[in-house]
Image: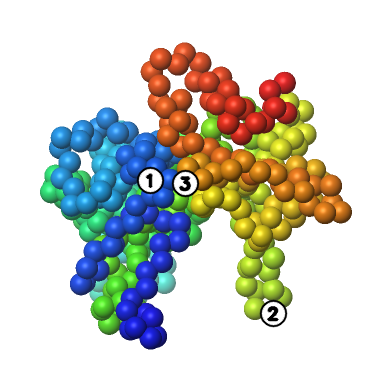
Amino acid sequence: ENPFTKKLILKAHRSIGIAQFTNFTVEIGPKFAEIDQIVELIEYVNDLDLEIFPESETEFQGKSDILSEIIIASFLNKVQVLFHQGMVKSYNIQKENIPALRGKLLLSQQLQNDFRGKLQFACEYDELEYNNLENQIILYCLKLCSNITRNPSHKQQINQLLQPISDLIDDKQITKDDFNKINYNQMNHHYKKIHDDCKFIIDSIKISDFFEEGSEKFTNSFFVNMDNIFEKFVFMLFDESYPNRCEQKTSSEGFRSEINKKETRDIEPDILINDDDEKLQLILDTKYKDDTISRDDRYQLSMYAAIKQKNDVYAILPETTSSKIEDWKVKNMNITIHVRYINIDEALKVINSPEIEDRSKSIRNFLEDTILFEKLSN
């Protein structure tokens, strides 16, 4: 709230989406492309299936609804496929008094039963059931989608999916930490993609409603962090063009104060490109922002180059009408910061063109022509 005018100040930062507050709705669209193109970009990054959601069946309140409804549609389709394949069961330990002996007899509890004249066995046994973390994540995300969607057919589909599982699975609050507790194996590997969708949906919601008392009241909202989407989009373009040579940032660990333990800045670039002998060739860092990089960005990029002992580092931005290719020389360090741009619309045309026979080669030609990576052409 502005202390002088008493009016609300809303900052979008680098997210797009929609939030339905008590008194009004806020829609934030993309800066560098039309919403339809952003949907295609997210389809490529998150392996969505747009064909299952024809536009003629869509009921939108606003353009930003397109994003959330298509992501929800893709998620619901994967849940249906999962139910047909079969949900995974896990053994859970049960302890109870039962008429017949089963599993292991609990001696101390059994002595109490005998003393009280209770004609039951105190048993501990393993029960194979659906109530496990894999399925608790699915249940939680289905209920989130029910709150987010404004499409009647989606609400109906969610209710149909919830009906057979609600009594079998505990309704648990899921956090991002829960995803790290799952080890994927032959039994549950088919959950990996659908859990990726769940994580994406959970990351995109929960903005507090400042018109309601109490911090636990949230709006029906869906926002996508375009920093993360753009970084993954650029990485996938290079990874498809130069297989087995790309590394994506795996940790966000930065400087940390020993006093308050507060993390301040990443010191790992977004993307590293190696040669065939796994020797580092290029350092790339994506910036989803307007025009060019800031002074802080230049400090950050020069640090990446110094740490990796390279003379060149590349900042990759979305192309706009005012984009200008430029190089920054870092004094006394023999480091050059190259500012380069990707035209999202042109990149999507290359990715989705049915006329292209060798997509990987076409993407590589596009990257080398657009971002001038002559070093990778050999």
- Image quadrant of residue 313? top right
Q: Are marks 1 and 2 in contact (CB under 8 Å)?
A: no
Residue 128 shows up from this direction: no
- Image quadrant of residue 143? bottom left
300 left or right of 34 in image: right
Labels 3 and 2: the sequence-earlier one? 3
44 left or right of 17 in image: right
Residue type for callout 3:
Ile
Q: Residue at x 43, y 45 (%)?
A: 32
**Residue density around tag 2, few if under 14, some if 14–19, many if 20 or more, within 10 Å:** few
* Count of number-bearing discs: 3
Please say which color scheme the image uses.
rainbow
Determine which residue is flagged by label 1. 197
Determine which residue is flagged by label 3. 229
Q: How far from the left and from the top, in percent, is residue 29? A: 34, 52
Dot 3: element: helix
Labels 1 and 2: the sequence-earlier one? 1
Numbered tag placed on residue 259 in the rendering = 2
Q: Residue at x 17, y 41 (%)?
A: 58
365 left or right of 36 in image: right
Residue type for callout 1:
Asp
Q: Nearer the viewer, residue 135 or 109?
A: 135
Q: How far from the left and from the top, in percent, is residue 116? A: 27, 77
Q: Nearer the viewer, mark 3 or mark 2?
A: 3
Q: How far from the left and from the top, in percent, is residue 204? A: 38, 56
Relative height, residue 25 to residue 190 (above, below): below
Q: How far from the left and from the top, in percent, is residue 206? A: 34, 64
Q: CA distance from mark 3 to mark 2?
A: 33 Å
